[in-house]
């Protein structure tokens, strides 16, 4: 008995290639570079020019205030006007103020790179640098706040561990309000960085609650402040490398301060001393 001939299976259509985000509808997860959100953050990146800003998406309905006008002037052809809903979908921080940008990653710096230029200004005059080392900070808002204070206190670099703790995320950029664009961030082992600072003659001050009030310590010279993470103080190996321990006296039954607040207190005590106010001894 003749069997019915089998029809060959129809040829399979090759799978459609994955759709790439267009410039009109950029994706929240585009890997082109670092994500910058907010007018202040994007404007700092454009103004300081430490790295290239690749492209900028600006709310099509944004009113031309001073910051938007300046972004338009500096951004040029890199700017694309888009609906605000697109920016809302792109946003990682949830607060973009009508502008999001992508920038090239910063060049990676080492402690050696920073120290080579830290003790002289552009004219070759001697200067006393300042550094902040943070071991295992876990909350992006804390790191962003430290960078903001570091910018205001003229810090030369902030050092964070290579693997532990938070790196520079869009939220860190947002909270630092330009601090992450201005203050060099070094990712290096804390012990290695401290050893190099000691060899360079930098006065190392750890932060812990059993330390001296910072206004009793000489902070106007070359100094590095070392802070632990949110859930713990300084580790014993780090503490042993410190020349002094500073603690902020507290009232009201408080046992400790937020790490970013502690950093601010120490940094601006240094600013006070460098302005000519003397070290104060306990009465």
Image (tube, rainbow, N blue to C red):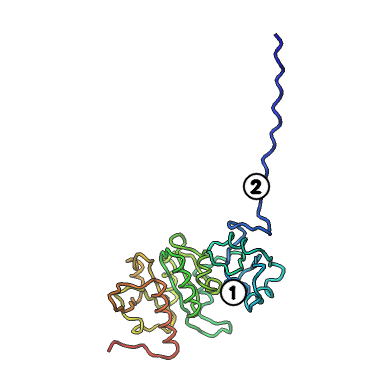
The residue under the point 65% across, 54% down is: 21
The x, y position of residue 222, in whole percent, is 44, 80
- Left/right placement of residue 115 relative to residue 256 reads right
* Residue 34, label in figure: none
Dot 1 or dot 2, earlier in sequence: 2
The x, y position of residue 201, in whole percent, is 42, 77
Q: Is residue 16 above or below residue 255?
A: above
Q: Quadrant of the N terminus?
A: top right
Q: Is residue 281 above or below residue 118?
A: below
The x, y position of residue 33, in whole percent, is 60, 61
- Left/right placement of residue 93 relative to residue 136 reads right
Callout 2 crowding tier (Cα within 10 Å): few <14, some 14–19, many ≥20: few
Examine the image and state in which quarter residue 264 appears: bottom left
The residue under the point 71% across, 25% down is: 8
Q: Is residue 1 above or below residue 37?
A: above
The residue under the point 33% across, 78% down is: 248
Q: Quadrant of the C terminus?
A: bottom left
* Residue 18, label in figure: 2
Q: Nearer the viewer, residue 113 or 229?
A: 229
Q: Nearer the viewer, mark 1 or mark 2?
A: 2
Q: Secondary structure at mark 2?
A: loop
The x, y position of residue 277, in whole percent, is 40, 90
The residue under the point 34% across, 65% down is: 232
Badges 1 and 2: C-beta atoms under 8 Å apart? no
Q: Nearer the viewer, residue 152 or 252?
A: 252
* Residue 44, label in figure: 1
In space, the residues marked 1 and 2 are separated at their CA atoms by 35 Å
Callout 1 crowding tier (Cα within 10 Å): few <14, some 14–19, many ≥20: some
Q: Nearer the viewer, residue 6 or 263?
A: 6
Q: Secondary structure at mark 1?
A: helix
């Amino acid at each position: 008995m003749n069997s019915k001939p089998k029809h060959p299976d129809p040829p399979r259509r090759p799978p459609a290639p994955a759709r790439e985000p267009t410039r009109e509808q950029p994706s929240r997860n585009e890997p082109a570079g670092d994500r910058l959100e907010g007018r202040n953050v994007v404007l700092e990146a454009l103004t300081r020019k430490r790295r290239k800003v690749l492209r900028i998406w600006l709310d099509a309905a944004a009113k031309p205030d001073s910051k938007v006008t300046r972004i338009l002037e500096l951004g040029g052809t890199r700017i694309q006007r888009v609906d605000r809903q697109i920016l809302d979908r792109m946003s990682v921080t949830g607060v973009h103020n009508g502008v999001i940008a992508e920038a090239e990653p910063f060049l990676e710096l080492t402690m050696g790179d920073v120290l080579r230029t830290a003790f002289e200004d552009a004219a070759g005059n001697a200067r006393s640098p300042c550094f902040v080392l943070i071991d295992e900070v876990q909350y992006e808002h804390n790191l962003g706040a430290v960078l903001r204070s570091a910018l205001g206190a003229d810090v030369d670099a902030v050092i964070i561990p290579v693997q532990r703790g938070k790196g520079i995320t869009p939220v860190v950029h947002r909270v630092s309000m330009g601090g992450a664009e201005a203050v060099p961030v070094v990712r290096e082992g804390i012990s290695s960085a401290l050893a190099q600072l000691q060899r360079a003659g930098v006065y190392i001050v750890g932060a812990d609650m059993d330390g001296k009030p910072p206004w009793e310590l000489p902070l106007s010279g070359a100094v590095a402040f070392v802070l632990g993470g949110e859930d713990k103080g300084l580790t014993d190996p780090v503490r042993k490398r410190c020349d002094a321990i500073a603690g902020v006296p507290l009232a009201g039954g408080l046992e400790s301060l937020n790490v970013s607040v502690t950093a601010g207190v120490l940094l601006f005590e240094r600013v006070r001393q460098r302005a000519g106010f003397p070290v104060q001894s306990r009465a």
